[in-house]
Amino acid sequence: MQKTNGVIAAGHPETVEAGLAMFGAGGNAFDAAVACILASCVTEPGLTSLAGGGFLLAHTNTNNNVLFDFFTQTPRSKCSISELDFYPVGVNFGRIIQEFHIGLGSMAVPGVWAGVIRVHETLGRLPFSVVAEPAIALAKRGVIVNSFQAYTFSNLLQPILLTMAEGREIYAPEGDILKMGDRILMKNFAQTLEALVSGGMAEFYQGEIAQKLVRDCQEQGGHLTLEDIKNYTVIEREPLKINYRGKTILTNPPPSAGGTLIAFALDLLSAVDLSGIEFGSRQYLQLLKTVMQLTNIARTEGLDGKLYQDHIADIFLASAASYQQQLIHPVNKWGSTTHISVLDQEGNAASVTTSNGEGSGYIIPGTGIMVNNMLGEEDLNPQGFHLWPENVRISSMMSPTLVLNQGKPEIVMGSGGSNRIRTAILQVLLNLIDFKFSVEDAVNSPRFHWENHRFDIEPGFDPEILNNLDLSEQDVIRLWPEKNMFFGGVHTLFRTTDGQLFGAGDQRRSGVSLNS
């Protein structure tokens, strides 16, 4: 096959190289995206897993748009809370400690492997064995731990990664957690992935892997049953479509919440002329702080608890008009994840976000695959833990996003970052569309996040402006000493009107972008 030209942005150089190898073999953007997903399980094992969940937003060169939802599913029945293996751990971001819950009782039905299979069968063109080979090779020969991996292993996820003996063999083979310059080997995962390539969907969801997972859940305090696992399906959804400044923005629809909240914020901003506002000015900070504030209010009043209702996106977005007056005349009313963006010269685009949460601490024996902890993430369970409805797709903040200009992909983006995903994507979108930044500047300019009266702000904004913001008595400013993965990892691609491809990996998560 003839080599394909394209560009990829992702969280690790080896992830990008896995995708570029598919371009070199004549594959398309979707072959490259699947190769990147598999490779990221080795290069970013603290952030993603075949037993996690995710979404891939696709635009094909035949102008089809589809959102592949392979996020995690709630179990069909609940165990007694008193019998659950479910307990809190603190994840230290440096300035704050965010609490998550892990254990077998935190595990939801995995979807990433099913998603990989479906996307490749539907849109890929290379043999699946070719697409999986880079990830298998990486797992066998190992990956040198970089500074970002070392940070996530030691500062954030150490108590989770070292929960089981198999985890300690991978992440602390000499007794201490791996540090920068060490090599992480995942030989069990390499063997498992080889078996999965041969066995396909059934190997994971009906075979020995499923049997081991279910047996341990039933014996050690988890919800999952064989019926939960074998009945998992990927859902193909129509993307949520937003019109903003003459461009079409496609993102993740309900029951996930992140895309709808981004759409709501853009609806609010559509009533404001940003051409006279300077990035980083007092007016800029004040405006976006108010947008974040109003979006959170609207979420509480009109979205949480209603995500499974028919036409909820239309109903919720229609309410934006009632909040716009407060934006124009404002009043003070009061993880771990990874992303891959792929674009090829044929006009195909893939925006894919996958996550393992923080990981449950449980590794399916002999596989090297840690299972997710989505039932233990507070932001995914806004009504409270253990109150989830049975057998539904879990709502997520993950928001793979595409921007179309006259029907062709112009921007491919998404982010990790828990409940900061929506504000990270929003700020990069504004940087590109309204402020006309280069893709590098759009991604790596300073960000902030407002939530629950807390104003988290990266360095780079004028201290005098920050000191003179119009804040309520309850609002607290927290200045971060440096850019941090807390504010997401928005790996982004941009295509110019004359077809040139540019990309930027987010420095906050050691992101990389390369062209073929």
Image: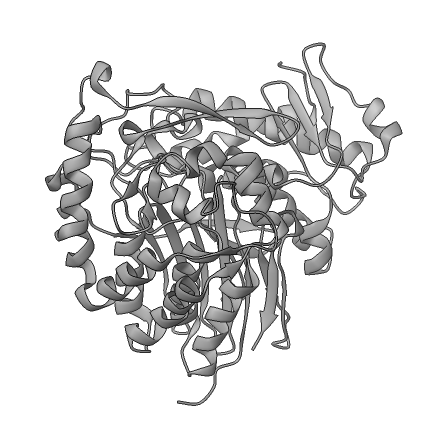
Residue extending furthest right? 464
> Quadrant location of the N terminus?
bottom left
Q: Residue furthest top?
A: 473
Residue 320 vertical placement versus 498 (above, below):
above
In the picture, the quarter occupied by the C terminus is: bottom right
Q: Where does residue 139 sit, x and y in percent of width and height?
A: 40, 62
Q: Residue at x 81, y 27 (%)?
A: 466
- Does residue 163 appear left or right of residue 332 in this picture? left
In-front residue for pair 311/12 = 12
**What residue is at 62 percent from the left and 14 percent from the top?**
333
* Coordinates of residue 32 in the picture (x, y in percent): 43, 70
Residue 130: where, in percent of width, then height? 34, 76
Left of 262 or right of it: where is 315? left
Report the coloring of the rendering. one colour
- At horizontal 74% and vertical 38% (from top left) the residue drawn is 482
> In the rendered image of this protein, does residue 93 appear above or below residue 332?
below
How many dots with numbers? 0
Which residue is situated farthest in the front direction here?
174
Quick check: 114 above or below 326? below
The answer to whether residue 184 is visible is yes
**Residue 227's spot in the image, x, y percent?**
10, 40
Whether residue 252 is visible here, answered yes or no, is no
115 relative to 304, above or below: below
Q: Nearer the viewer, residue 102 or 229?
A: 102
Q: Nearer the viewer, residue 449 or 513?
A: 513
